Image (cartoon, grey):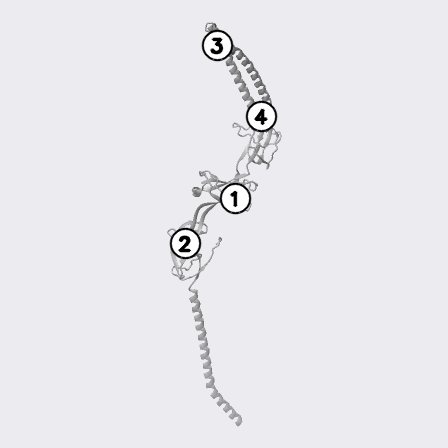
Amino acid sequence: MVEVAASVSREKANLARWIPVIGRRRRVLLLVGGLFVVAGVVGLLLRAGRSNTSGSVPTVAVIKASRESLKQTLTLTAEFRPYQQVSLHAKVAGYVQSIPVDIGDHVKAGDLIAHLDVPELTNEVEKDRAALKASRADAERVEANYEEAHLPYQRLQSVAQGHPKLVAQQEVDNARAKDQSAAGALAATKQHVDECTAELHKTEALVNYADITAPFDGVITHRYADLGALIPAGTSSNTQAMPVVDLAEDGRLRLVFPVPESAVSKIKVGASVTISVGALNESFTSAVSRFADKLDRDTRTMSTEADVENPDGRFKPGMYGDVTLIIAERKNVVTVPVEAVSVDKHKSTALMVDRKGIVRALSVTLGMQTAERFEVKSGLLPGDMVIVGSRAGIQPGTRVDPKVTTLTASE
Protein backbone atom coordinates (compact mmCIF):
# COMPACT_ATOMS: atom_id res chain seq x y z
CA MET A 1 0.00 0.00 0.00
CA VAL A 2 2.86 2.31 0.84
CA GLU A 3 4.37 1.61 -2.63
CA VAL A 4 1.10 2.31 -4.37
CA ALA A 5 0.72 5.61 -2.62
CA ALA A 6 4.27 6.57 -3.52
CA SER A 7 3.63 5.73 -7.21
CA VAL A 8 0.50 7.88 -7.29
CA SER A 9 2.41 10.75 -5.81
CA ARG A 10 5.08 10.49 -8.50
CA GLU A 11 2.44 10.53 -11.31
CA LYS A 12 0.81 13.63 -9.87
CA ALA A 13 4.16 15.35 -9.80
CA ASN A 14 4.86 14.49 -13.47
CA LEU A 15 1.42 15.73 -14.52
CA ALA A 16 1.94 18.96 -12.73
CA ARG A 17 5.16 19.51 -14.70
CA TRP A 18 3.44 18.93 -18.16
CA ILE A 19 0.38 21.13 -17.70
CA PRO A 20 2.23 24.45 -18.26
CA VAL A 21 3.92 22.99 -21.36
CA ILE A 22 0.61 21.93 -22.97
CA GLY A 23 -0.94 25.36 -22.34
CA ARG A 24 1.91 27.12 -24.12
CA ARG A 25 1.62 24.84 -27.20
CA ARG A 26 -2.11 25.42 -27.39
CA ARG A 27 -1.64 29.17 -27.40
CA VAL A 28 0.95 28.87 -30.16
CA LEU A 29 -1.38 26.73 -32.28
CA LEU A 30 -4.21 29.21 -31.79
CA LEU A 31 -1.93 32.09 -32.80
CA VAL A 32 -0.76 30.31 -35.95
CA GLY A 33 -4.34 29.45 -36.92
CA GLY A 34 -5.37 33.06 -36.45
CA LEU A 35 -2.56 34.22 -38.71
CA PHE A 36 -3.73 31.81 -41.44
CA VAL A 37 -7.28 33.12 -41.13
CA VAL A 38 -6.12 36.74 -41.40
CA ALA A 39 -4.00 35.90 -44.45
CA GLY A 40 -6.98 34.24 -46.16
CA VAL A 41 -9.25 37.19 -45.52
CA VAL A 42 -6.61 39.59 -46.84
CA GLY A 43 -6.23 37.45 -49.96
CA LEU A 44 -9.96 37.44 -50.55
CA LEU A 45 -10.10 41.19 -50.12
CA LEU A 46 -7.21 41.66 -52.55
CA ARG A 47 -8.87 39.43 -55.16
CA ALA A 48 -12.16 41.26 -54.70
CA GLY A 49 -10.35 44.56 -55.11
CA ARG A 50 -8.71 43.38 -58.30
CA SER A 51 -12.10 42.13 -59.57
CA ASN A 52 -13.76 45.45 -58.79
CA THR A 53 -10.93 47.31 -60.47
CA SER A 54 -11.26 45.33 -63.73
CA GLY A 55 -15.11 45.59 -63.72
CA SER A 56 -15.05 49.36 -63.50
CA VAL A 57 -14.28 49.62 -67.27
CA PRO A 58 -17.41 48.31 -69.05
CA THR A 59 -17.29 46.75 -72.49
CA VAL A 60 -19.50 48.43 -75.12
CA ALA A 61 -20.41 47.51 -78.69
CA VAL A 62 -19.33 50.11 -81.23
CA ILE A 63 -19.48 50.45 -84.98
CA LYS A 64 -17.46 52.73 -87.22
CA ALA A 65 -19.05 55.51 -89.22
CA SER A 66 -18.46 54.82 -92.91
CA ARG A 67 -19.10 56.28 -96.34
CA GLU A 68 -21.88 54.57 -98.26
CA SER A 69 -24.55 55.27 -100.85
CA LEU A 70 -28.07 55.36 -99.43
CA LYS A 71 -31.35 54.75 -101.20
CA GLN A 72 -34.72 55.66 -99.77
CA THR A 73 -37.27 53.19 -101.11
CA LEU A 74 -41.02 52.73 -101.04
CA THR A 75 -42.65 49.31 -101.48
CA LEU A 76 -46.21 49.15 -102.79
CA THR A 77 -48.62 46.38 -103.71
CA ALA A 78 -49.32 46.20 -107.45
CA GLU A 79 -51.63 44.25 -109.75
CA PHE A 80 -51.03 42.87 -113.23
CA ARG A 81 -53.64 43.90 -115.78
CA PRO A 82 -53.97 43.26 -119.54
CA TYR A 83 -52.30 45.88 -121.69
CA GLN A 84 -55.50 46.02 -123.75
CA GLN A 85 -58.86 44.34 -123.18
CA VAL A 86 -62.13 44.61 -125.04
CA SER A 87 -65.56 43.01 -125.31
CA LEU A 88 -66.16 42.21 -128.98
CA HIS A 89 -69.69 43.01 -130.17
CA ALA A 90 -71.40 42.41 -133.50
CA LYS A 91 -71.92 45.39 -135.76
CA VAL A 92 -74.99 43.74 -137.27
CA ALA A 93 -77.60 41.47 -135.74
CA GLY A 94 -77.44 37.83 -136.72
CA TYR A 95 -77.22 34.21 -135.67
CA VAL A 96 -73.90 32.63 -134.76
CA GLN A 97 -73.06 30.33 -137.65
CA SER A 98 -69.55 29.47 -136.41
CA ILE A 99 -67.38 30.38 -133.41
CA PRO A 100 -63.99 28.62 -133.61
CA VAL A 101 -62.55 30.03 -130.36
CA ASP A 102 -63.10 29.31 -126.69
CA ILE A 103 -61.82 30.49 -123.31
CA GLY A 104 -58.03 30.37 -123.10
CA ASP A 105 -57.43 30.32 -126.85
CA HIS A 106 -54.69 32.64 -128.10
CA VAL A 107 -55.45 34.52 -131.30
CA LYS A 108 -53.59 36.84 -133.63
CA ALA A 109 -54.83 40.17 -134.95
CA GLY A 110 -57.23 39.48 -137.82
CA ASP A 111 -58.10 35.92 -136.78
CA LEU A 112 -61.77 34.95 -137.12
CA ILE A 113 -63.61 34.99 -133.79
CA ALA A 114 -67.15 34.27 -135.04
CA HIS A 115 -69.22 34.32 -138.22
CA LEU A 116 -72.84 35.47 -138.17
CA ASP A 117 -75.57 34.39 -140.53
CA VAL A 118 -77.37 37.53 -141.75
CA PRO A 119 -79.62 36.50 -144.72
CA GLU A 120 -81.33 39.88 -144.87
CA LEU A 121 -78.04 41.54 -145.72
CA THR A 122 -77.38 39.04 -148.50
CA ASN A 123 -80.71 39.91 -150.08
CA GLU A 124 -79.99 43.59 -149.60
CA VAL A 125 -76.70 43.23 -151.45
CA GLU A 126 -78.45 41.63 -154.43
CA LYS A 127 -81.05 44.37 -154.43
CA ASP A 128 -78.44 47.11 -154.33
CA ARG A 129 -76.46 45.50 -157.14
CA ALA A 130 -79.57 45.37 -159.31
CA ALA A 131 -80.36 49.01 -158.54
CA LEU A 132 -76.81 50.00 -159.45
CA LYS A 133 -77.01 48.10 -162.73
CA ALA A 134 -80.30 49.78 -163.63
CA SER A 135 -78.96 53.23 -162.79
CA ARG A 136 -75.90 52.65 -164.95
CA ALA A 137 -78.11 51.56 -167.89
CA ASP A 138 -80.26 54.65 -167.42
CA ALA A 139 -77.15 56.79 -167.32
CA GLU A 140 -75.96 55.32 -170.62
CA ARG A 141 -79.33 56.11 -172.25
CA VAL A 142 -79.34 59.66 -170.90
CA GLU A 143 -75.76 60.15 -172.01
CA ALA A 144 -76.72 59.09 -175.55
CA ASN A 145 -79.58 61.61 -175.53
CA TYR A 146 -77.18 64.24 -174.35
CA GLU A 147 -74.83 63.51 -177.25
CA GLU A 148 -77.75 63.80 -179.68
CA ALA A 149 -78.67 67.22 -178.33
CA HIS A 150 -75.14 68.47 -177.76
CA LEU A 151 -73.70 67.87 -181.25
CA PRO A 152 -76.42 69.82 -183.17
CA TYR A 153 -76.07 72.68 -180.75
CA GLN A 154 -72.30 72.78 -181.29
CA ARG A 155 -72.76 72.85 -185.06
CA LEU A 156 -75.36 75.63 -185.00
CA GLN A 157 -73.25 77.59 -182.56
CA SER A 158 -70.22 77.30 -184.84
CA VAL A 159 -72.17 78.37 -187.96
CA ALA A 160 -73.83 81.26 -186.11
CA GLN A 161 -70.43 82.54 -185.01
CA GLY A 162 -68.91 82.29 -188.52
CA HIS A 163 -71.98 83.34 -190.53
CA PRO A 164 -74.47 85.17 -188.32
CA LYS A 165 -77.04 85.65 -191.13
CA LEU A 166 -77.21 82.02 -192.22
CA VAL A 167 -78.79 80.66 -188.99
CA ALA A 168 -81.73 82.14 -187.13
CA GLN A 169 -81.02 83.02 -183.55
CA GLN A 170 -84.16 81.19 -182.49
CA GLU A 171 -82.76 77.91 -183.76
CA VAL A 172 -79.58 78.48 -181.81
CA ASP A 173 -81.52 79.23 -178.65
CA ASN A 174 -83.67 76.12 -179.04
CA ALA A 175 -80.60 73.93 -179.55
CA ARG A 176 -78.95 75.45 -176.48
CA ALA A 177 -82.03 74.71 -174.34
CA LYS A 178 -82.10 71.09 -175.47
CA ASP A 179 -78.39 70.74 -174.80
CA GLN A 180 -78.68 72.16 -171.28
CA SER A 181 -81.69 69.95 -170.49
CA ALA A 182 -79.81 66.86 -171.67
CA ALA A 183 -76.75 67.86 -169.61
CA GLY A 184 -78.90 68.27 -166.49
CA ALA A 185 -80.51 64.87 -167.01
CA LEU A 186 -77.08 63.28 -167.49
CA ALA A 187 -75.75 64.84 -164.26
CA ALA A 188 -78.81 63.58 -162.37
CA THR A 189 -78.38 60.03 -163.63
CA LYS A 190 -74.69 60.06 -162.78
CA GLN A 191 -75.52 61.22 -159.27
CA HIS A 192 -78.00 58.38 -158.99
CA VAL A 193 -75.32 55.93 -160.07
CA ASP A 194 -73.03 57.29 -157.35
CA GLU A 195 -75.79 56.92 -154.77
CA CYS A 196 -76.47 53.34 -155.79
CA THR A 197 -72.78 52.55 -155.69
CA ALA A 198 -72.45 54.00 -152.18
CA GLU A 199 -75.48 52.06 -150.99
CA LEU A 200 -74.02 48.86 -152.36
CA HIS A 201 -70.69 49.51 -150.64
CA LYS A 202 -72.50 50.17 -147.37
CA THR A 203 -74.43 46.92 -147.60
CA GLU A 204 -71.31 44.96 -148.55
CA ALA A 205 -69.51 46.48 -145.56
CA LEU A 206 -72.32 45.36 -143.28
CA VAL A 207 -72.03 41.89 -144.75
CA ASN A 208 -68.33 41.94 -143.93
CA TYR A 209 -69.24 42.77 -140.32
CA ALA A 210 -70.80 39.33 -140.15
CA ASP A 211 -67.20 38.16 -139.66
CA ILE A 212 -66.01 39.21 -136.19
CA THR A 213 -62.19 39.30 -136.06
CA ALA A 214 -59.57 39.95 -133.39
CA PRO A 215 -58.33 43.57 -133.34
CA PHE A 216 -55.03 42.60 -131.64
CA ASP A 217 -53.07 39.59 -130.41
CA GLY A 218 -54.44 38.20 -127.18
CA VAL A 219 -56.28 35.50 -125.30
CA ILE A 220 -60.02 34.80 -125.09
CA THR A 221 -60.98 35.38 -121.46
CA HIS A 222 -64.76 34.89 -121.77
CA ARG A 223 -67.16 33.49 -124.34
CA TYR A 224 -70.80 34.62 -124.23
CA ALA A 225 -72.38 32.94 -127.26
CA ASP A 226 -72.73 29.46 -128.73
CA LEU A 227 -73.80 28.20 -132.16
CA GLY A 228 -77.22 29.45 -133.18
CA ALA A 229 -77.36 32.23 -130.61
CA LEU A 230 -78.95 35.48 -131.77
CA ILE A 231 -76.47 38.32 -131.36
CA PRO A 232 -77.98 41.82 -131.36
CA ALA A 233 -76.15 44.64 -133.04
CA GLY A 234 -73.86 46.54 -130.70
CA THR A 235 -74.50 50.20 -131.42
CA SER A 236 -74.27 53.42 -129.45
CA SER A 237 -78.01 53.25 -128.88
CA ASN A 238 -77.85 49.62 -127.71
CA THR A 239 -75.14 49.69 -125.06
CA GLN A 240 -76.58 46.63 -123.26
CA ALA A 241 -76.11 44.34 -126.26
CA MET A 242 -74.51 41.01 -125.43
CA PRO A 243 -70.88 40.71 -126.60
CA VAL A 244 -69.55 37.64 -128.36
CA VAL A 245 -66.25 37.24 -126.47
CA ASP A 246 -63.86 39.15 -124.21
CA LEU A 247 -60.32 39.53 -125.55
CA ALA A 248 -57.27 40.55 -123.49
CA GLU A 249 -53.72 41.25 -124.61
CA ASP A 250 -51.39 39.19 -122.43
CA GLY A 251 -48.12 39.33 -124.33
CA ARG A 252 -47.51 42.62 -122.55
CA LEU A 253 -49.10 43.59 -119.24
CA ARG A 254 -49.62 46.72 -117.21
CA LEU A 255 -48.44 46.56 -113.59
CA VAL A 256 -50.65 49.10 -111.82
CA PHE A 257 -49.82 50.44 -108.35
CA PRO A 258 -51.09 53.37 -106.24
CA VAL A 259 -48.47 55.93 -105.19
CA PRO A 260 -49.33 57.82 -101.98
CA GLU A 261 -49.56 61.59 -101.99
CA SER A 262 -46.29 61.98 -100.06
CA ALA A 263 -44.30 60.32 -102.87
CA VAL A 264 -46.13 61.65 -105.93
CA SER A 265 -43.57 64.37 -106.60
CA LYS A 266 -40.80 61.74 -106.79
CA ILE A 267 -42.42 59.74 -109.63
CA LYS A 268 -40.82 60.19 -113.06
CA VAL A 269 -41.37 58.34 -116.33
CA GLY A 270 -38.43 56.01 -116.85
CA ALA A 271 -37.58 55.74 -113.14
CA SER A 272 -36.31 52.27 -112.25
CA VAL A 273 -38.51 49.96 -110.16
CA THR A 274 -37.88 46.52 -108.68
CA ILE A 275 -40.77 44.07 -109.00
CA SER A 276 -41.19 41.00 -106.82
CA VAL A 277 -43.86 38.39 -107.61
CA GLY A 278 -44.36 36.20 -104.57
CA ALA A 279 -46.52 33.63 -106.36
CA LEU A 280 -43.62 32.86 -108.71
CA ASN A 281 -40.78 33.60 -106.26
CA GLU A 282 -39.31 35.89 -108.92
CA SER A 283 -37.86 39.41 -108.94
CA PHE A 284 -36.87 41.64 -111.84
CA THR A 285 -36.48 45.30 -112.76
CA SER A 286 -38.62 47.51 -114.95
CA ALA A 287 -39.38 51.23 -115.27
CA VAL A 288 -42.28 53.61 -114.74
CA SER A 289 -44.11 53.82 -118.08
CA ARG A 290 -46.86 56.33 -117.26
CA PHE A 291 -48.87 57.82 -114.41
CA ALA A 292 -52.26 59.51 -114.07
CA ASP A 293 -50.81 62.87 -112.98
CA LYS A 294 -53.76 63.34 -110.63
CA LEU A 295 -54.79 61.96 -107.25
CA ASP A 296 -57.81 59.83 -106.57
CA ARG A 297 -60.06 61.81 -104.23
CA ASP A 298 -61.04 58.77 -102.17
CA THR A 299 -57.64 57.11 -101.67
CA ARG A 300 -55.34 60.14 -102.09
CA THR A 301 -53.12 58.06 -104.35
CA MET A 302 -51.98 58.39 -107.94
CA SER A 303 -52.36 55.45 -110.32
CA THR A 304 -48.96 54.56 -111.80
CA GLU A 305 -48.04 51.87 -114.34
CA ALA A 306 -45.01 49.89 -115.44
CA ASP A 307 -45.12 47.84 -118.65
CA VAL A 308 -44.02 44.22 -118.27
CA GLU A 309 -43.22 42.06 -121.29
CA ASN A 310 -44.84 38.63 -120.96
CA PRO A 311 -43.97 36.59 -124.06
CA ASP A 312 -44.13 33.23 -122.28
CA GLY A 313 -47.31 34.07 -120.36
CA ARG A 314 -45.89 33.31 -116.91
CA PHE A 315 -47.52 36.43 -115.47
CA LYS A 316 -51.31 36.32 -115.39
CA PRO A 317 -53.68 39.29 -115.26
CA GLY A 318 -54.93 39.62 -111.71
CA MET A 319 -51.67 38.49 -110.09
CA TYR A 320 -50.24 40.65 -107.32
CA GLY A 321 -46.67 41.81 -106.92
CA ASP A 322 -44.61 44.19 -104.80
CA VAL A 323 -43.08 47.25 -106.47
CA THR A 324 -40.10 48.94 -104.83
CA LEU A 325 -39.50 52.54 -105.94
CA ILE A 326 -36.33 54.53 -105.33
CA ILE A 327 -37.69 57.90 -104.24
CA ALA A 328 -34.39 59.44 -103.07
CA GLU A 329 -30.69 58.58 -103.27
CA ARG A 330 -27.45 59.88 -101.71
CA LYS A 331 -24.05 58.75 -102.92
CA ASN A 332 -20.81 58.50 -100.90
CA VAL A 333 -22.12 60.03 -97.67
CA VAL A 334 -21.15 59.42 -94.02
CA THR A 335 -23.57 56.96 -92.46
CA VAL A 336 -24.18 55.24 -89.13
CA PRO A 337 -26.79 52.69 -88.03
CA VAL A 338 -30.05 54.13 -86.74
CA GLU A 339 -29.31 52.41 -83.40
CA ALA A 340 -26.31 54.71 -82.95
CA VAL A 341 -28.29 57.96 -82.79
CA SER A 342 -30.69 59.26 -80.15
CA VAL A 343 -33.24 61.55 -81.78
CA ASP A 344 -35.59 63.92 -80.00
CA LYS A 345 -37.49 67.07 -80.96
CA HIS A 346 -34.56 69.40 -80.42
CA LYS A 347 -31.39 67.55 -81.37
CA SER A 348 -29.80 64.29 -82.42
CA THR A 349 -26.96 62.84 -80.37
CA ALA A 350 -24.43 60.05 -80.83
CA LEU A 351 -22.05 58.62 -78.21
CA MET A 352 -18.55 58.38 -79.68
CA VAL A 353 -15.60 56.55 -78.13
CA ASP A 354 -12.30 58.35 -78.73
CA ARG A 355 -8.85 56.77 -79.03
CA LYS A 356 -8.34 56.80 -75.24
CA GLY A 357 -11.60 54.92 -74.68
CA ILE A 358 -13.45 57.96 -73.31
CA VAL A 359 -17.13 58.38 -74.20
CA ARG A 360 -18.03 61.71 -75.79
CA ALA A 361 -21.54 62.95 -76.61
CA LEU A 362 -21.68 64.55 -80.07
CA SER A 363 -24.50 66.53 -81.61
CA VAL A 364 -25.03 65.35 -85.18
CA THR A 365 -26.98 66.71 -88.15
CA LEU A 366 -28.91 64.02 -89.96
CA GLY A 367 -29.95 63.78 -93.58
CA MET A 368 -31.61 60.89 -95.36
CA GLN A 369 -32.90 58.00 -93.30
CA THR A 370 -33.37 54.44 -94.53
CA ALA A 371 -34.68 51.46 -92.64
CA GLU A 372 -31.18 50.70 -91.29
CA ARG A 373 -28.97 53.79 -91.52
CA PHE A 374 -28.82 57.56 -91.10
CA GLU A 375 -26.95 59.98 -93.31
CA VAL A 376 -24.77 62.17 -91.06
CA LYS A 377 -24.22 65.60 -92.58
CA SER A 378 -22.07 66.89 -89.72
CA GLY A 379 -20.77 65.82 -86.32
CA LEU A 380 -19.04 62.56 -87.28
CA LEU A 381 -16.22 61.55 -89.59
CA PRO A 382 -15.59 58.25 -91.34
CA GLY A 383 -13.91 55.87 -88.91
CA ASP A 384 -15.38 57.41 -85.73
CA MET A 385 -16.56 54.69 -83.33
CA VAL A 386 -20.10 55.18 -82.07
CA ILE A 387 -21.89 53.13 -79.43
CA VAL A 388 -24.78 50.97 -80.63
CA GLY A 389 -27.30 49.06 -78.61
CA SER A 390 -27.96 49.70 -74.93
CA ARG A 391 -26.50 52.87 -73.39
CA ALA A 392 -27.62 52.10 -69.82
CA GLY A 393 -25.09 53.41 -67.35
CA ILE A 394 -22.92 54.96 -70.07
CA GLN A 395 -22.29 58.65 -69.47
CA PRO A 396 -20.07 61.12 -71.34
CA GLY A 397 -16.58 61.03 -69.81
CA THR A 398 -16.81 57.35 -68.86
CA ARG A 399 -13.89 55.10 -69.79
CA VAL A 400 -15.07 52.03 -71.73
CA ASP A 401 -13.62 49.06 -73.54
CA PRO A 402 -14.93 49.35 -77.16
CA LYS A 403 -15.57 46.20 -79.15
CA VAL A 404 -16.22 46.74 -82.88
CA THR A 405 -19.28 44.83 -84.04
CA THR A 406 -21.24 44.36 -87.24
CA LEU A 407 -25.00 44.80 -87.35
CA THR A 408 -27.06 42.45 -89.46
CA ALA A 409 -30.29 43.38 -91.22
CA SER A 410 -32.34 41.67 -88.51
CA GLU A 411 -30.64 43.67 -85.80
- Which residue carries the number 2 mark? 342
Q: Please, what secondary structure does the residue beneath circle 4 have?
A: helix
Residue 61: image location, x then y, percent = 45, 59
Residue 16: image location, x then y, percent = 47, 88
- Which residue carries the number 3 mark? 158
Q: Are marks 4 and 1 in contact (CB under 8 Å)?
A: no
Q: Quadrant of residue 397?
A: bottom left
Residue drawn at x 43%, y 65% is 55
Question: What is the C-alpha distance between the residues marked 1 and 3?
Answer: 89 Å
Q: Are marks 1 and 3 in contact (CB under 8 Å)?
A: no
Identity, as a three-letter code, of the amino acid under mark 2:
Ser
Question: What is the C-alpha distance between the residues marked 2 and 4?
Answer: 79 Å
Identity, as a three-letter code, of the amino acid under mark 1:
Gly
Mark found first going from the N terminus, 4 or 1: 4
Identity, as a three-letter code, of the amino acid under mark 3:
Ser
Identity, as a three-letter code, of the amino acid under mark 4:
Val
Q: Please, what secondary structure does the residue beneath circle 1 have?
A: strand
Mark found first going from the N terminus, 2 or 1: 1
Q: Please, what secondary structure does the residue beneath circle 2 have?
A: strand
- Which residue carries the number 1 mark? 321
Mark found first going from the N terminus, 4 or 3: 3
Mark found first going from the N terminus, 3 or 2: 3
Please state which of the two labelled residues, at mark 3 or mark 2, is closer to the viewer: 3
Mark found first going from the N terminus, 2 or 4: 4
Residue drawn at x 43%, y 49% is 331
Residue 207: numbered disc:
4
Please state which of the two labelled residues, at mark 2 or mark 4, is closer to the viewer: 4
Please state which of the two labelled residues, at mark 4 or mark 3, is closer to the viewer: 3
